[in-house]
Image: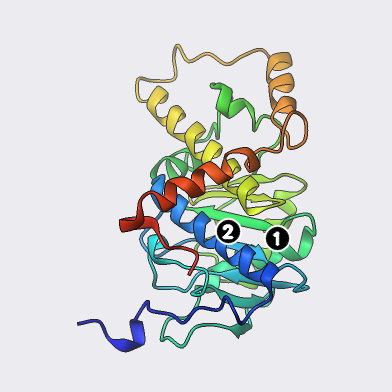
Amino acid sequence: MTDPQYSTDFPSLKAVVPEAEWEERCKLAACYRLMDRYGMTDLIYNHITTRIPGGGERLLINLYGLLYREITASSLVELDLDGNIHRKPDTAYGINKSGYIIHGCIHRARPDVHCVIHTHTRAGMAVSAMDCGLLPMTQTATRFHGHLSYHSFEGPAIEQSEQERLVADLGPHNAMILRNHGLLVCGASVPQAFNLMYQLELACRAQVDALAAGRDGVSVPDVSVLQRSAHLYQPGTRRPYGELEWHALLRQLKAEPGAYAPYDS
């Protein structure tokens, strides 16, 4: 029998928080479940954060102890950029310190960033340990040519002193490989960030598959082609990436109620 302190039956906040915040909570909860749906989770670990609309420097993050497929709009925790909790469900679960160490500094330094996603996927960790980093060897990977940064491993991210280096290494980019660690992306919206992480993960999986046969014979397009391809994938160049497929992804979640719905509760 589940200990009541660790129940996942949380009262709905729909009538408690502002409408704009509720909508953002639903988007973030859906994003967590989509990450599970597409195999980008690590048990209860990792984090996705989003700014609360009109909330200044307040963020939403997951409870530390829930699987991504268990997260709902009402189970999300409200905290500030220094990790102080301002609203959370009545539960023994808290938050993962690494969540605001990594995410808080990015939100503070980059006002353009609305959502940050960090993962420890098998393919992401594999590429993070490769000296070559991500190779622009597939159309999906070319999206990140000239738009990807790297941060050296300093151990588990629990020290605030690392924040300055994280921000400096990310720079103006929206995607970063944390060496010997995993992947990180940020976006102007939850749908945009999810799309970016999905593509980065896919590029890493393709690279791991291709290099399983050895580096010899793997081709990379000409630099001019890479530059043009990367440009065409930037937000606003052709279409707002992430937004077009978002409603289809939500329909997919609602069509699989046993595992992924209701996230908007």
The picture places residue 127, in percent across and down from the top left corner, at 48, 38
At a point 34% along the width and 82% down the height, the residue shown is 6
- The label on residue 106 is 1
The residue type indicated by label 2 comes to Lys
Helix, strand or loop at label 2? It is: helix
Displayed quadrant of residue 139: top right
Check if mark 2's residue and mark 1's residue have beta carbons within 8 Å: no
In the image: residue 255, left or right of residue 143: left
At a point 69% along the width and 75% down the height, the residue shown is 18
Decide if residue 85 is in sight here. yes
Q: Which of the two discs, 2 and 1, sits closer to the camera?
A: 2
Decide if residue 151 is in sight here. no
Which residue is more in the foreground, 159 or 239?
Answer: 239
The residue type indicated by label 1 comes to Ile
Displayed quadrant of residue 102: bottom right
Q: Residue at label 2?
A: 27
Rendered position, 246 above or below 81: above
From this viewpoint, which residue is outermost toward the left?
1
Within-10-Å neighbours for mark 2: few <14, some 14–19, many 20+? many
In the image: residue 118, left or right of residue 53: left
Helix, strand or loop at label 1? It is: helix
At a point 30% along the width and 57% down the height, the residue shown is 258
Q: Quadrant of the N terminus?
A: bottom left
In the image: residue 1, left or right of residue 210: left
The picture places residue 237, in percent across and down from the top left corner, at 77, 30
The picture places residue 223, in percent across and down from the top left corner, at 70, 16
Which residue is more in the foreground, 133 or 246?
Answer: 246
Which residue is more in the foreground, 40 or 87?
Answer: 87
Which residue is more in the foreground, 92 or 217?
Answer: 92
The picture places residue 46, in percent across and down from the top left corner, at 48, 61
- The label on residue 61 is none
First in sequence, mark 2 or 1: give its number. Answer: 2
